[in-house]
Amino acid sequence: MKFKQSTYWLFLLPCLLAITFVIIVPFLQGIYYSLTDYNGFQISSFVGFDNYRRLFTDQNFLNSLRFTAGFSIASIIGINVIGLAFALLVTQKSNKVSTVFRTIYFMPNLIGGIILGFIWQFIFIRAFDGLAQLTGWGIFSDWLASTRTGFWGLVILFVWQMSGYIMVIYISFLNNVPQELLEASTIDGANAWQRFRHVKFPLIAPAFTISLFLTLSNAFKVYDQNMALTGGGPFGSTEMVTMNIYNSAFMTREMGYAQAKAVIFLVIVATISVIQIYFTRKREVDL
Amino acid sequence: MNGKSYSRYSFMIIGGLTSLLWIYPFYLVIVNSFKTRGEIFTSPLNLPIDATLANYPVAFARLDFIQSFFNSTIVTAGSIALIVFCTSMAAYALSRRPSKTSSMIYFIFAILMLVPFQSIMIPLIAIFGKVDMLNRTGLAIMYLGLGSSLAIFLYFGALRGIPKALDEAAIMDGCNRFQVYWYIMFPMLKSTTVTVIVLNAIWFWNDYLLPSLVINRAGMHTIPLRTFYFFGEYSRQWNLALAGLVLAIIPIIILYMFLQKYIIKGISDGSVK
């Protein structure tokens, strides 16, 4: 039974139009903007690669890249270690209690970055101040007032938010580990660590690739949490790439220059994703 | 103590402690929202001495809660309806007419997933501004463009498992293609539809950046947008700010309690497939 060509295109039309006008045209337009001095209203001259040249000497932009990279590395480690630990814990037992644990770990993920950022602003500023008074420990004083505490504040917030999400991915892989294998290894005298290291670990290896890269590309794209928690402060030192792009586009209105940053950002994120796909495929072939 | 009960205790203790730690930020926000401004400053960690509900009516009014809730619901529900309908139909066409063209289109959708929103944000707003589409309809269209790849993949995967003999039988019986899609395929895709709804609902309901560029006008503010401005005005008055945050979270937590099973399943299907 043939699918008529006209019907076929009619069914695809809404999605094709949407991706054309929402992604493809803006993408091409964006490359053109990045070569001009576009300010949001008009383009007065074509500047070639000047915007790109300027990027590599722009300390604010380079700092935001470094800050984002550091944030991503710290978050990826935290999220994956905690996410995996949570997954191993809640798959130990399948009862009401483990469902309750799972529900709680996952909860922060449902709430938007703006609200999470404000919640943690309260925790870091007021509750930590209370902790400082209670314990007398300096480590709890003046959070979010320096670059270092702003950095760790963002990492803590993001780890708290994303661990439950990554836990769900690890759980779905752990549930596919055949029960007979675990029983057989127990009978053979393997302890909990050995069962993890030699039975579960190799079987959930694909989950690591997925989770590592998912957290990496999500960490690079963070904006709302950054906006609500530190707002880039103090003095723009906790500004991530996305906020840096946003500010030069909508605050200083150097849209052409901002778009050049956006193109570089695209190249970085797309490269990360392509490497992920390569490794996932390669592993599938190897198995 | 034998090994089994030992592992039971460690499960309860580790799980219990980490759960408490995880939920503690919510607890602090809720508890402090019942305090006066002064008490939040003097003792943020204690239970309220003199619990008050006075913060809530003020926060409720200043958040314009009913209006913001309504706006969020309209934006989320409208965008979801559009994306579910359009992407399931597109995936149906792609799955039932295998050809070079179909593979090509599928590949284009895949490639576009690599494009992060911020890299096309500036021209996107410029283009939609030029045709006067910086409104809720425009926002729904943007979400369709940005979200169609993942939804099409999920639907395409599910459709491959439905035998084509079913389509053929229905067409023999006099259905046209749209009827086959709407009356036979779409109901069979229910579990994928739940996944698509869950993933997109979390995204649309919580999104801040895109709505802030597209529908940033009084009367159209969604909950995240309104919360942002509200917090800016009241960040020195933590009592009101915290009551506002609690109000902003409540709808999500209630929904989560009822739909927990679907939400977790949706997240895990959406990220693993």
Image (tube, coloured by chain):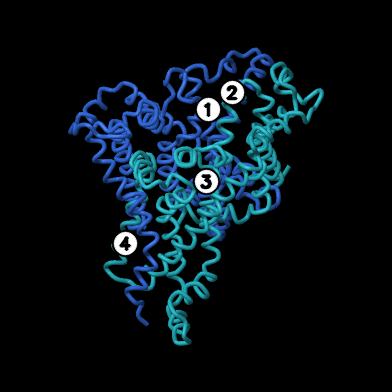
Residue A177 visible in image: no
Could you give the CA–CA distance between mark 2 and mark 3, rounded to whole angstroms?
40 Å
| Quadrant location, the N terminus of chain B | top right
- Amino acid of disc 3: Gln
Q: Is residue A241 above or below residue A96?
A: above
Q: Which mark is residue A194?
A: 3
Q: Is residue A56 above or below residue B80?
A: above
Q: Position of residue A275 (x, y in %)?
A: 32, 45
Could you give the CA–CA distance between mark 1 and mark 3, rounded to whole angstroms?
41 Å
| Quadrant location, the C terminus of chain B | bottom left
Quadrant location of residue B61? top right
- Amino acid of disc 2: Phe
Could you give the CA–CA distance between mark 4 and mark 3, rounded to whole angstroms?
47 Å
Of badges 4 and 3, the one in the foreground is: 4
Q: Which mark is residue A124?
A: 2
Q: Position of residue B266 (x, y in %)?
A: 54, 55
Label 1 marks which chain's residue? A
Q: Which mark is residue B105?
A: 4
